């Protein structure tokens, strides 16, 4: 594969993509296959809500820490944890919108607010074995798991100044829910569990509509056909998941109800379970 | 039960997932006078000295005239080589995108070495905050065109090649900085009805809107498709100019604001 080819003014390395336009659909499709490599298929990613859990303070956070410590006792349960930023993210964006900052500027700013929650989580969990994981130091993960250390990941994806123009409105599209989904997807993890303050995903915001209906176990394709506008998870997540190859299961549980996270870790049907149809 | 402690703000209580944010938004341009310029990988850098040196001469001349230029580099054949091998190994798109960061970075470092005597300074992707200093000092900042998404690059249907590569990085940089036009230096006069390297009957397109370009449904386009999509909903960057760096005078003319090459408008 290392043969050098010239003759058109450029020097090429011989490869299937040599001299080709990477915009050409025919060329692009040659790179595809039915599967993606799965690096860590036995790991669960646990995402803890900012607004839903951390903004409630001690009363919501400490019972969840207790539950995580119990889960950690079983060394075969491998997990990575990430956290959202909550109300401080909303305040940051509100101010940034008023100032007219570009969407990339907003995306660059918000990660700091999630990080505050990550520091709190780590301070509470460290006595039982946890460590902040650097942005993309995934290759340390086997070492963490062997040592019984739970890594705490950075949840906001590094779109930063390069956040693309939003499809509608002015807010960045790639938040912490998407960032943690993508982390699990690219590493081929077993499942993602989103810990929020509702018993799952509803067709309407249950905080505003008492008649909101909860989804139980549902296929992603079915959910996409009726995706609620006001949603407990980022829209970008659902669109990315539709095109993804690896992740098969996302569960949304209520972190205010003790035991739901533990049940979801065991693969039980609790809260809302969204399944990717492997045939899709 | 513990209540949410919420800071009062326009978005307090919002799930931030609905399309309707009802906030009054009057955008502020960060550095609207900057020219964001891409130097193509396969089209320019892989050609070496013969193609690159005359282009750099014109960029240095523009800088001497007081035009503020930021250079972003493409990847080229080494990027294609690693994409090809990584695809065989069925690497996820996020891994392929991470691999794709390294070659434009090498190319940026090469340009910096060549431009050092004229104020060329290497910039990391997150260093936009230092740009005012570099430009006031008369420097020519050089950085990789690859967006920093890496492992967080989403998979696209039907391919594992990342959809945001260095053209997207150039457009998104211009959009963040509030520049109206992004300039792409390639080895063709811009847009054609087909790949002119393969089809001699292909004809040149002087100007076209993004919408018209999408409607033509060409199997191959000169810029990454995602850029054409974003152009239609951008806040600031409304024009993409593509010039032939192999033709003397084109780069300097474009940097002076002349409509040479092809222009794609929002």
Image (tube, coloured by chain):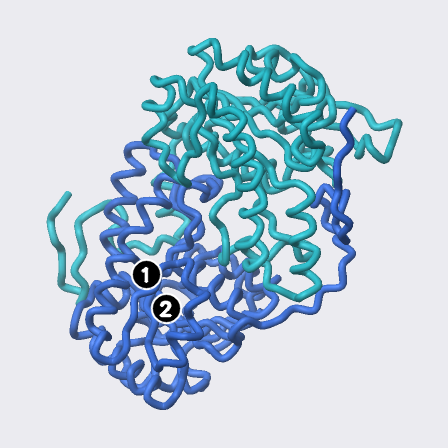
Chain colours: A cyan, B blue
Vertical position of residue A261 compared to residue B163: above or below: above
- Whole-angstrom CA distance, mark 1 to mark 2, is 7 Å
Q: Position of residue A250 (x, y in %)?
A: 58, 24
Q: Residues within 10 Å of mark 1 (few under 14, many from 20)?
A: many
Vertical position of residue B50 compared to residue B74: above or below: below
Residues at marks 1 and 2 touching, judged by CB atoms closer than 8 Å: yes
Residue found at the very far bottom of the displayed protein: B65
Q: Residue at x 34, y 56 (%)?
A: A21
Q: Residue at x 56, y 54 (%)?
A: A109
Task: State which quadrant residue A170 falls in.
Answer: bottom right
Query: Which quarter of the rendered picture does the N terminus of chain B lie within?
Result: top right
Q: Position of residue A164 (x, y in %)?
A: 54, 55
Left or right, residue A102 beside residue A254: left
Task: State which quadrant residue B237 falls in.
Answer: bottom right
Left or right, residue A97 beside residue B64: right
Residue found at the very far right of the displayed protein: A210
Q: Position of residue B51 (x, y in %)?
A: 21, 74
Q: Could you confirm whether marks 1 and 2 are on the same chain?
A: yes
Kind of element beneath mark 2:
strand
Q: Residue at x 40, y 81 (%)?
A: B136
Query: Which one is earlier in the sequence, the residue at label 1 or at label 2?
Result: 2
Quick check: can you spot residue B208? no
Q: Which residue is mark 2?
A: B38
Parent chain of label 2: B
Quick check: can you spot residue A183? yes
Residue found at the very far left of the displayed protein: A3
In this orientation, which residue lies closer to the viewer: A215 or B144?
Answer: B144
Query: Which quarter of the rendered picture does the C terminus of chain B lie within?
Result: bottom right
In this orientation, which residue lies closer to the viewer: B154 or B118?
Answer: B118
Q: Residue at x 29, y 38 (%)?
A: B86
Q: Which residue is mark 1?
A: B74
Parent chain of label 1: B
């Amino acid at each position: 594969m290392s043969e050098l080819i010239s003759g058109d003014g450029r020097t090429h390395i011989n490869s299937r993509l040599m001299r080709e336009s990477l915009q050409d659909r025919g060329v692009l499709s040659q790179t595809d296959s039915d599967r993606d490599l799965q690096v860590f298929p036995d790991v669960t990613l646990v995402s803890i809500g900012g607004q839903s859990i951390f903004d409630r303070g001690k009363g919501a956070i400490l019972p969840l820490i207790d539950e995580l410590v119990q889960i950690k006792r079983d060394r075969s349960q491998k997990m990575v944890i990430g956290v959202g930023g909550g109300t401080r993210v909303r305040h940051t964006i509100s101010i940034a919108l008023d100032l007219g900052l570009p969407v990339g500027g907003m995306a660059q700013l918000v990660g700091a607010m999630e990080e505050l929650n990550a520091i709190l989580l780590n301070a509470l969990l460290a006595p039982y074995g946890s460590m902040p994981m650097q942005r993309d130091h995934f290759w340390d993960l086997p070492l963490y798991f062997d040592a019984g250390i739970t890594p705490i990941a950075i949840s906001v994806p590094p779109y930063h100044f390069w956040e693309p123009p939003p499809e509608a409105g002015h807010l960045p599209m790639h938040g912490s829910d998407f960032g943690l989904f993508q982390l699990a997807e690219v590493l081929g993890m077993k499942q993602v569990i989103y810990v929020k303050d509702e018993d799952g995903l509803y067709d309407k915001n249950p905080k505003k509509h008492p008649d909101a209906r909860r989804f139980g176990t549902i296929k992603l394709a079915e959910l996409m056909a009726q995706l609620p506008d006001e949603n407990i998870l980022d829209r970008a997540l659902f669109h990315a998941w539709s095109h993804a190859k690896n992740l098969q299961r996302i569960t949304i549980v209520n972190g205010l109800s003790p035991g739901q996270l533990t049940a979801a870790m065991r693969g039980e049907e609790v809260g809302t379970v969204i399944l990717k149809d492997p045939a899709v | 039960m513990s209540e949410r402690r919420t800071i009062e703000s326009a978005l307090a209580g919002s799930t931030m997932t609905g399309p309707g944010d009802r906030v009054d938004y009057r955008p502020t341009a960060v550095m609207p006078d900057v020219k964001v310029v891409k130097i193509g990988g396969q089209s320019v850098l892989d050609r070496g000295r013969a193609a690159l040196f005359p282009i750099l001469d014109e960029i240095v001349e523009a800088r001497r005239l007081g035009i503020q230029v930021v250079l972003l580099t493409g990847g080229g054949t080494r990027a294609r080589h690693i994409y090809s091998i990584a695809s065989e190994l069925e690497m996820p798109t996020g891994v392929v995108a991470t691999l794709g960061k390294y070659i434009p970075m090498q190319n940026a470092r090469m340009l910096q070495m060549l431009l050092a005597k004229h104020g060329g300074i290497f910039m990391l992707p997150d260093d936009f905050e230092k740009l005012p200093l570099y430009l006031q000092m008369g420097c020519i900042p050089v950085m990789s065109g690859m967006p920093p998404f890496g492992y967080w690059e989403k998979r696209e249907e039907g391919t594992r090649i990342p959809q945001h590569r260095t053209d997207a990085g150039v457009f998104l940089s211009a959009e963040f900085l509030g520049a109206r036009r992004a300039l792409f230096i390639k080895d063709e006069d811009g847009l054609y009805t087909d790949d002119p390297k393969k089809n001699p009957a292909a004809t040149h397109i002087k100007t076209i809107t993004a919408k018209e370009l999408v409607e033509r449904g060409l199997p191959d386009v000169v810029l990454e498709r995602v850029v054409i999509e974003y152009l239609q909903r951008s806040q600031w960057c409304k024009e993409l100019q593509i010039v032939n760096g192999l033709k003397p005078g084109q780069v300097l003319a474009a940097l002076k604001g002349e409509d040479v090459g092809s222009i794609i408008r929002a």
